[in-house]
Amino acid sequence: MLSFKWVEICEKSLGYSTNVEIIEKRITELKQNPHYYIIVAEEDEEVVGFMEAEKYDLIYGERGYNLIVLGVLPAYQDKGYGKMLIEALEKEVIDNKASFIRLNSRVERKGAHGFYEHLGYEWKKTQKNFKKKVG
């Protein structure tokens, strides 16, 4: 059984409304996907942050990883948990002979942008993100 900390991270750190049942179901499904990674940060056996990433394969280029989500509870930010999560993903990338990590960060998340830049990530392009709900 997951704790409500997962919900708190999604809502307070990422701005997404969810519930424990949805998170439990998705983690169970995603654990079956060998191209998908969930890395957790804990303090005193409590989840304080997590990251989701997936292998990113391109026909026209090298293999990389797509950082999908990185969230740390506000009370635990600026304590090294985000950096630890990024470093764990960077190790995964190296171990799997990939060459890069890419990510998207909403324009209003200025603090996140500074965090990524501090860790050596570069802003590469501006683009529109399109989405269509089907089914």
Image (cartoon, rainbow, N blue to C red):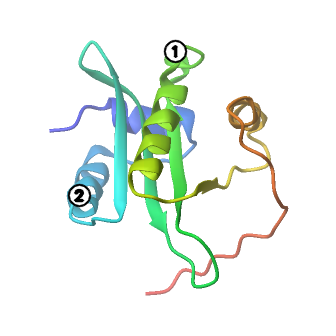
The spot of residue 34 in percent (x, y) is 28, 65
In the current view of this chain or complex, which residue is farthest to the left? 1
Label 1: how many Cα within 10 Å (few below 14, some 14–19, many 20+): few
Image point (45%, 58%), residue name: 97
Under mark 1, the amino acid is: Ala
The residue to which callout 1 is attached is 75
Q: Which mark is residue 23?
A: none
Considering only order in the chain, which callout, 2 or 1, is on the residue closer to the N terminus?
2
The residue under label 2 is 31
Residue 126 placement (x, y as % from top left)? 85, 62
Rendered-image quadrant of the C terminus: bottom left
Residue 100: x and y in percent read 60, 56
Left or right side of 19 for 53: right
Numbered disc 2: secondary structure:
loop
- Compared with 41, 90 (above or below) is below
> In the image, 104: left or right of 81?
right
Q: Residue furthest right?
A: 126
Q: In this picture, is 68 found above or below 10?
A: below
- Residue visible at 53% across and 18% down in the picture: 80
Where does the image place residue 29, in percent across and percent down from the top left? Answer: 23, 63
| Element on which disc 1 rests | helix
For the point 39% across and 50% down, which residue is it?
Answer: 95
Q: Is 25 situated left or right of 113 in this image?
A: left
Residue at the image position 20 percent from the left and 57 percent from the top: 28
Q: Nearer the viewer, mark 1 or mark 2?
A: 2
Q: Is residue 54 above or below residue 21?
A: below
